[in-house]
Image: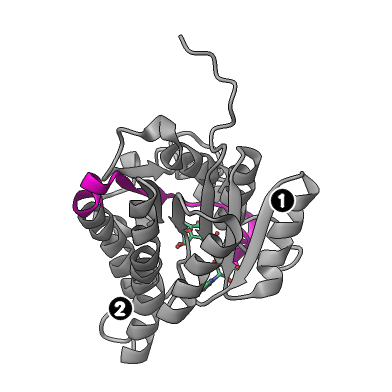
Amino acid sequence: MEKRSRLRLDGKVAIVSGAGVQAGAGVGNGKATAILFAREGARVVLVDAVREWAEGTQSAIQSEGGEAIVVQADVSAPEDCRRAVEASLAHHGALHILVNNVGVGSRGCVTDVSDEEWQRVVSVNLMGMVYMSRYAIPHMRASGGGAIVNISSVTALRPKRMAPYTVTKAAVVGLTHAMALDHAAERIRVNCIMPGLVYTPRVAQRATGEMRETRRTSTPLQIEGEPWDIGWAAVYLASDEARWVTGVVLPVDGGFLLTSAPN
Ligand SMILES: NC(=O)c1ccc[n+]([C@@H]2O[C@H](COP(=O)([O-])OP(=O)(O)OC[C@H]3O[C@@H](n4cnc5c(N)ncnc54)[C@H](O)[C@@H]3O)[C@@H](O)[C@H]2O)c1
């Protein structure tokens, strides 16, 4: 058996979108992913709509001796996405990994959600991934391959009066399958993580202790999900250890999908 001496993402350059988190609020899925990537040797490009929030992640990475730059960008704006990819090339000279992590929540059903709200959620949650991938893929192709990880949600399969969010998170699965096939010959692997009920700062804003407990006990493992759980899955899918894995949708949910009622 080969002994592992290298870090798992040694020499890789990775963009993580939505890599920030509100000041002082702990870690979200993007921040945890970016920190773990840097610990595994990647040079990271932290993309976020709020510069200071991404700078918080940058400080955390730099304090551990890692390398990261910040690009303020709104992923729903194609020109911002182009600029984020160009910054990666200009600063690090390469791009091997893209984690499409941005996703905004939205409540309501088709009878009460406005056109503007549908547009907002589709343009961030779906088109944001399309734009980032559109500009990243040519550079991955030119350098002989790459890995893209798209972040969906168990809500794609277990909807709950969150129509725009559910629809866009289901679309992320379709997008992953389409891209995985379309770009396989270019050695670009495209996979998807389907997080369960993770305790992130966004959830913390509205979660009571009772809600947290209900979320925890809804998982067969009876463990509360943390952003680090999502980050570790992203490390695997982005690394060369997953070189034969593409088009996969990986639930990281403590077993939630096994026992929650299918709708
Ligand atoms: N928290 C959960 O329980 C959970 C469950 C399933 C899936 N997810 C998914 O995980 C991902 C991350 O969730 P989170 O709760 O950790 O993140 P979050 O909501 O805390 O947001 C992370 C960052 O994204 C940035 N962002 C928002 N809109 C942006 C835009 N248009 N362009 C660029 N940056 C933008 C924010 O500024 C923030 O710093 C999302 O796709 C979410 O849908 C979360």
Residue 238 falls left or right of residue 127: right
Q: Earlier in the sequence, mark 2 or mark 1?
A: 1
Q: Name above or below for residue 29 compared with residue 221.
A: below
Looking at this rendering, what residue extends furthest in the right direction?
63
Amino acid carrying mark 1 in the image: Ile
Residue 145 numbered tag = none
Residue that mark 2 sits on: 109
Q: How far apart are labels 2 and 1 at the CA level?
A: 40 Å
Q: Which residue is mark 1?
A: 61
Q: Is residue 191 magenta?
A: yes
Question: Relative to 177, is 198 on the left or the right?
Answer: right
Task: Mark yes or no: residue 107 visible.
Answer: no
Quarter of the image holding residue 127?
A: bottom left
Question: In terms of depth relative to the viewer, which is nearer, 107 or 234?
Answer: 234
Q: Quadrant of residue 6?
A: top right
Residue 184 picture location, percent across and down: 23, 46
Q: Residue at 45% of width from left, 49% of height from top?
A: 96
Does 234 appear in magenta? no
User: Regarding mark 1 in the picture, which secondary structure is present there?
Assistant: helix
* Span colored in magenta: 180-209
Taking the image as shown, residue 70 lies to the left or right of residue 115, namely: right
